[in-house]
Amino acid sequence: MQSSGRPWRSYLPVRPWLGAHRVHIRPSRAGLAFGALLLALWIAAVNFQLGLGYALTCFAAACAIVDMLFASRNLAGLSLAAAPGQAVFAGDSAVFTLRLINRSGRSRHAITVHPAISEAQQADVAAHGKSAIAINVATTRRGWLEAPAVRLSSSFPLGLFYAWCWWQPEARVLVLPRPETPSPALPMPARQQENQHQELAGVRAYQPGDPQQRLAWRQIARHDGEHLYSKHFQDSGDSQGALLFDLASLPVTLEPEARLSRLAAWVLQAERAGLPYGLRLDGLTLAPGLGPRHQESCLRALAEAP
């Protein structure tokens, strides 16, 4: 969901540091084959007393040892940070941004980032640089979604050894109830049903979904058409005519999640129509209001409802 107000994010200043003790290493398949080749060279050099065979074997073994060192150092010393994206509706993909931060003077190459529940991606991190990787996680239910565990791995430079470590990003995304589609008409209060007379309350920036007949052409012309504005109406009476979405008033035949989905749809409809609305859940009441912050508060209350 793209919100025009303050995004629901929780950037964490804590940046875990990958010390050498957290990096594991083992020979790869190519490394095992290379080890078998070294053994064959050593046996041949011993049997035939080949001085060049000894030199070649020792040189190849030294290259393998250097490769093991560099494979481990390609991960060790990285700083890690994670940040969630904006809130999404259930069924959409949540986006987490993982940042690899290199504070050393040497570049890091071919680092594979493999989340536990999505495809792997590769990244290079320049010296004293950063690299950001976005991972998408499918959502199935409302509530807070924690970032999945991530495996960082590298076989750079020769591919003879495989270095890896696990990282649990400390980030989460709020998953909102998916609005009911199609949803019933808004439950208009009795006073508003009897008297539909509304007064002009002012002019605001155009929002997607505003009726075309409510466009404020005078203000649009005043700004040479660079921005769109729409008229905002409200009841001629007091706040008693505001909409109040009460969870207890919905039919008991609806499933609990379906009732929350209907309230979410009504919140979005009322916000688009410019009608003040409030929300009443079990043990929680939000006073009628309008605006992105009020919409955010209502949707968040629905997402966190027990």
Image (cartoon, rainbow, N blue to C red):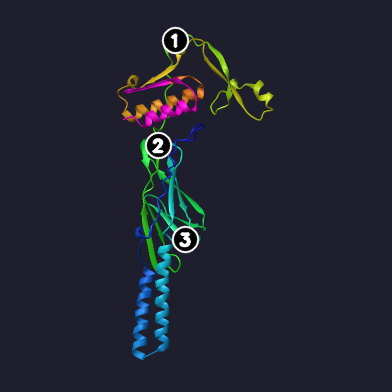
- Residue 182 can be seen in this image: no
Instruction: Give the amino acid at mark 1.
Output: Arg
The residue singled out by tag 1 in the image is 191
Question: Could you say where residue 218 lies in the image, as x and y percent from the top left?
Answer: 66, 20
Question: Is 94 part of what is drawn in magenta?
Answer: no
- Residue 148 can be seen in this image: yes
> Which of the marked residues, 2 or 3, is nearer the chain's N terminus?
3
Instruction: Give the amino acid at mark 2.
Output: Leu
Q: Secondary structure at mark 3?
A: strand
- Extent of the magenta region: 278-306
The residue singled out by tag 3 in the image is 110
* Quarter location, residue 164: bottom left
Instruction: Give the amino acid at mark 3.
Output: Ala
Residue 174 shows which numbered tag?
A: 2
Which residue is depicted at the point 65% across and 25% down? Answer: 220
| Mark-to-mark CA distance, 2 and 1 | 36 Å
Which is more foreground, mark 3 or mark 1? 3
Q: Is residue 63 above or below residue 226?
A: below
Q: Is residue 43 left or right of residue 122?
A: left
> Which of the marked residues, 3 or 1, is nearer the chain's N terminus?
3
Viewer-side residue, 27 vs 128: 128
Q: Is residue 45 above or below residue 273?
A: below
* Quadrant in which the C terminus appears: top left
